[in-house]
Image (tube, rainbow, N blue to C red):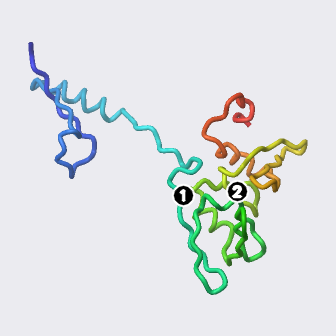
Amino acid sequence: MTAVHATMDFGDRGSNDPATEISLDNGDPHLREVVKAAGEELSLPERPRRTVAMEKSARIAIKAKRRILFMDAADVIVVEAKGKYVSLLRTASSHMLRESISTMEEKLNLHGFVRIHRSVLVNAAMVEEMHPLSTGEYVLRVRGGREFTVTRTYKKNLQLLAQLWIGMEDFAAE
């Protein structure tokens, strides 16, 4: 039985970890090139851009009435733009912040918030149901009963509301 040995480099040049190399060499330079070419053709799947609540809920610190309040992002139901301010709506309270809705979207999108309107972000974990309108828009109801319109511009973001859609093949194709 002939021993086979070739080395494949997975790009981690600074590592001395033997787990980053696979040996298959019998001294044949042709085999080494074939193995190297095969390794270059392999591509790793891309990481998803984001999913609903990818990480443990973040803590948000906000300045309110000369105090700094701490809350879990998971406790926020909706973020709504109100002129130059945004309103963070929670089950028991709401807070006004001088921040843009775009900035809030950047900060909260990895924590399960989805933009559904030019002035509304919703916490995907708080969405209870939605139904289509004849205009191509949707109405989305969140915990607590409030309803928001999902405009056609942001309709594609509805797929981020759930990691698994069952029986919704037609919806996902839109």
> Residue placed at 50% from the left, 54% from the top?
56
Q: Where is residue 52 in the image (x, y as percent from the top left)?
A: 59, 48
Q: Residue 158: name its quadrant.
A: top right
Which quadrant of the figure contains the C terminus?
top right
Q: Is mark 2 on a helix, strand or loop?
A: strand
Hey, which residue is sitting farthest top in the picture? 1
Q: Is residue 22 above or below residue 120?
A: above
The answer to which of 54 and 43 lies nearer the viewer is 54
Residue occupied by mark 2: 122
Q: Where is residue 129 in the image (x, y as percent from the top left)?
A: 77, 44
Left or right of 97: which side holds 11? left
Q: In this view, does 65 lie above or below 107?
A: below
The answer to which of 17 and 153 lies nearer the viewer is 17
Q: Position of residue 123 (x, y in %)?
A: 67, 55
Left or right of 70: which side holds 31? left
> Residue placed at 47% from the left, 42% from the top?
46
Which numbered marker is on residue 57?
Answer: 1
Residue type for callout 1: Ser
Left or right of 171: which side holds 24? left
Hey, which residue is sitting farthest right in the picture? 134
Spatial CA distance of label 2 from label 1 is 15 Å
Which numbered marker is on residue 36?
Answer: none
> Residue placed at 26% from the left, 47% from the top?
12
Q: In this view, does 115 lie above or below 92?
A: above
Q: Position of residue 170 (x, y in %)?
A: 74, 30
Q: Residue 9: name its quadrant.
A: top left
Residue type for callout 2: Val
> Residue placed at 47% from the left, 44% from the top?
47
Q: What element carries label 1?
A: loop
Q: Residue 69: name its quadrant.
A: bottom right
